[in-house]
Amino acid sequence: MINLPKIVLASASPRRVEILTSVGWPFDKVPADIDESEVEGETSAEYVARLAEEKALAVARQRPNEIVLGADTTVVIDDGILGKPLDLDDAKRMLGLLSGRSHFVLTGVAVAINDKVESALERTRVDFREMDEDEIEFLAVKGDPLDKAGAYAVQAQAALFISGIEGDYWNVVGLPIGTVYRLIMGSKIRTGR
């Protein structure tokens, strides 16, 4: 029998809360307050990894000796990052970019205790079928896109338009829980190895 250690989630994401709750992982939620601006010359993988680590470390300073989980997810197409849309027009623009194409969802995951941190990166390919203007409008209006990287949720209306996923489905939802499990349970900083 395994024992999932209690963690502190350094995120306000409802999807991350739902995923941790669904697997029965005990946690407290303490959203991190950090600057999420991109750094010039940074790759998308470096960006999500850095933000995940910064979130975990920021909250670990407030919660000494506790296991803190930080994560950051972004959508990448044509080597460009699609964050959360600014408004519905921006959501429609993003969905238009995704229509009929493949893109990648990257999530940086970091575990921190005090000032020590370990991290991992998950990468999943998502294929969208071609969407017409009415379908893009539907997805932008009904899909609640404004708090989601890439303007869609794989587990909601966007499922109508996704033709394939290669990799970790939970990564696309917002937290690659298998990666989190392996990282925390194998963590040298947690076990003191």
Image: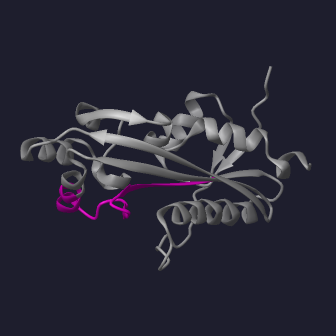
Residue 119 is a magenta residue: no
Question: Residue furthest toward the top?
Answer: 1
Q: In the visual, does 123 lie left or right of 193?
A: left
How many numbered marks does the figure carry?
0
The answer to whether residue 176 of the structure is visible from this angle is yes
Q: Is residue 182 above or below residue 87?
A: above
Q: Nearer the viewer, residue 127 or 67?
A: 127
For the N terminus, the image quarter is top right
In percent of the image, x 41 and y 43: which residue is there?
125
In percent of the image, x 44 and y 40: which residue is there?
173
Question: Residue furthest toward the bottom?
Answer: 40
Which quadrant of the view contains residue 83?
bottom left
Residue 49, position as x, y percentages in the image: 59, 60
- Its colouring scheme is one colour
In percent of the image, x 46 and y 34: which residue is there?
169
Residue 9, position as x, y percentages in the image: 63, 49
Residue 54, position as x, y percentages in the image: 63, 66
The answer to whether residue 155 of the structure is visible from this angle is no
In percent of the image, x 24 and y 57: which residue is there?
94
Residue 121, position as x, y percentages in the image: 59, 51
Q: Which residues are magenta?
A: 70-93
Q: In the visual, does 132 lie left or right of 122?
A: left
Q: Is residue 37 above or below residue 63?
A: below
